[in-house]
Image (cartoon, grey):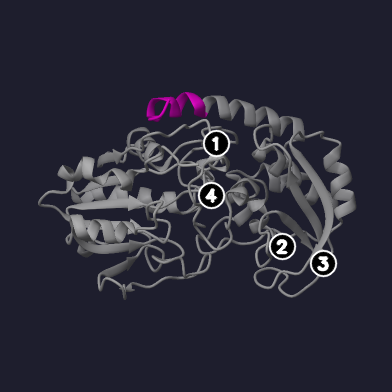
């Protein structure tokens, strides 16, 4: 089945006037391409005065691991300078900005607050405002649709996995997020979004005939985006979230984990759209590498009915209650707080200060509040 969807980069000819007589920089990675696998780098190099590239986490070609330091380098295919925005600094310097008049952004997002590409975008937007440069977003779908759920980030726990007060599942495209960041949170750069055509925001990418290009090494499928919203909190604990296995984020556990007890406790909540299976797995990288872990494998049975954030926070609550062995981990590099609080966007899970029902009430309040905020910035209905 052929898709009627045209993403932003596939509509560049309709907006080519924006690039006339302008020096162009591009923030992209291996997902920055058309459905025919033509790279956004090649498109801009042929149609505009492309001067340099900017790399977020995982690098231009997706060759760098999660959290790994990235230095600036030359792109071997184009001989363009690639400036790292995930190295010593996450913000472009004046020297970098002096080389361009426009910076473009074309990266596939996964729809989660704690996915770092959207904050690379925000930081560069801030630099564009400071140095009087234009910023253009080539828009792409939110693979999870426009459904919103979660708790609003408490700014006491601001980090590179949560910088603005949005929900874990924000339900916006990167173009819509850019508009919200720019206007709601006073970046005020010269922003333009090249929108998609034929996009239905109510559909997930599970329904799309377009090819999925994994945006980072542990998000291999569209389905993984859903599991990521459930179990990524374990990145903030000494519990494996399945990195280093064939099904990252679909499984979680540890050598000392009690899957039977966890599953029994979870079933008492009667969540729709999910089933659980006791499992054993061996991560070959990351936490508990080469150790046999007891754990839980998740099976989403209804992608429309499932409440990803509610389920994820409940799994955390139950797991912490049942395991004295669980320890909270420090962040990769932000310092100050701990990784679990950064991912949750607050401390109520770590402290156990809210009951499950109080957590659900907070999620409902915060979701309705954020829906009112985001409504002004939605481009697709």
Which mark is first along the chain, 1 or 2? 1
83 vs 316, left or right, is: left
Q: Badge 2: how crowded within 10 Å, few (<14), some, or many (20+)?
A: some
Foreground mark, 1 or 4, reads 4
Q: Residue at x 33, y 72 (%)?
A: 72
Q: Tell me how far mark 3 sits from mark 1, CA to CA.
A: 33 Å
Task: Find residue 215 and report its horizontal and vertical position in percent.
Answer: 49, 57
User: On residue 269, which mark appears?
Assistant: none
Q: What range is drawn magenta here? A: 370-381
Q: Looking at the rendering, which quadrant does residue 152 occupy?
A: top right
- Which of these two is toward me, 332 or 379? 379
Label 1 SS: loop
Do the numbered discs 2 and 3 sit on residues whose CB atoms are within 8 Å? no
The Cα–Cα distance between marks 2 and 1, rounded to whole angstroms, is: 25 Å
Q: Which residue is mark 4?
A: 114
Residue matched to label 1: 152
How far apart are the two marked residues, 1 and 4, measured between alpha carbons? 12 Å
Q: Are marks 4 and 3 in contact (CB under 8 Å)?
A: no
In front: mark 3 or mark 1?
A: 3
């Amino acid at each position: 089945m052929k898709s009627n969807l045209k993403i932003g980069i596939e509509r560049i000819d309709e907006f080519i006037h924006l690039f006339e007589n302008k020096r162009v920089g591009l923030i992209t990675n291996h997902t920055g391409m058309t459905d025919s696998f033509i790279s956004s780098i090649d498109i801009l190099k042929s149609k505009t005065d492309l001067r340099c590239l900017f790399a977020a986490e995982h690098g231009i070609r997706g060759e760098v691991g999660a959290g790994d330091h990235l230095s600036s380098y030359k792109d071997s295919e184009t001989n363009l300078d690639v400036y790292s925005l995930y190295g010593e600094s996450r913000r472009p310097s004046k020297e970098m900005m002096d080389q361009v008049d426009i910076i473009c952004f074309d990266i596939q997002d996964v729809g989660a607050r704690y996915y770092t590409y959207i904050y690379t975008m925000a930081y560069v937007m801030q630099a564009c405002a400071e140095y009087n440069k234009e910023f253009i977003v080539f828009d792409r779908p939110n693979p999870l649709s426009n459904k919103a759920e979660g708790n609003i980030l408490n700014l006491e726990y601001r980090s590179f996995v949560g910088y603005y007060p949005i929900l874990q599942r924000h339900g916006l495209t990167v173009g819509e997020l850019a508009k919200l960041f720019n206007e709601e949170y006073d970046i005020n750069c010269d922003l333009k979004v090249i929108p998609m055509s034929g996009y239905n925001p109510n559909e997930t990418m599970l329904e799309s005939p377009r090819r999925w290009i994994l945006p980072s090494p542990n998000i291999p499928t569209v389905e993984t985006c859903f599991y990521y919203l459930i179990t990524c909190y374990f990145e903030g604990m000494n519990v494996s979230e399945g990195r280093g296995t064939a099904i990252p984020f679909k499984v979680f556990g540890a050598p000392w984990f009690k899957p039977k007890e966890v599953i029994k406790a979870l079933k008492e909540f009667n969540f729709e759209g999910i089933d659980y299976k006791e499992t054993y797995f061996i991560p070959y990288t990351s936490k508990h590498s080469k150790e046999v872990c007891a754990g839980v494998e998740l099976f989403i049975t209804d992608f429309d009915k499932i409440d990803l954030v509610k389920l994820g926070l409940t799994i955390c609550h139950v797991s912490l209650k049942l395991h004295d062995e669980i320890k909270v981990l420090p962040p990769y590099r932000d310092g100050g707080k701990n990784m679990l609080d950064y991912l949750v966007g607050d401390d109520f899970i770590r402290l156990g200060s809210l009951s499950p029902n109080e957590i659900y009430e907070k999620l409902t309040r915060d979701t309705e509040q954020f829906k009112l905020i985001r409504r002004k910035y939605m481009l697709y209905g």
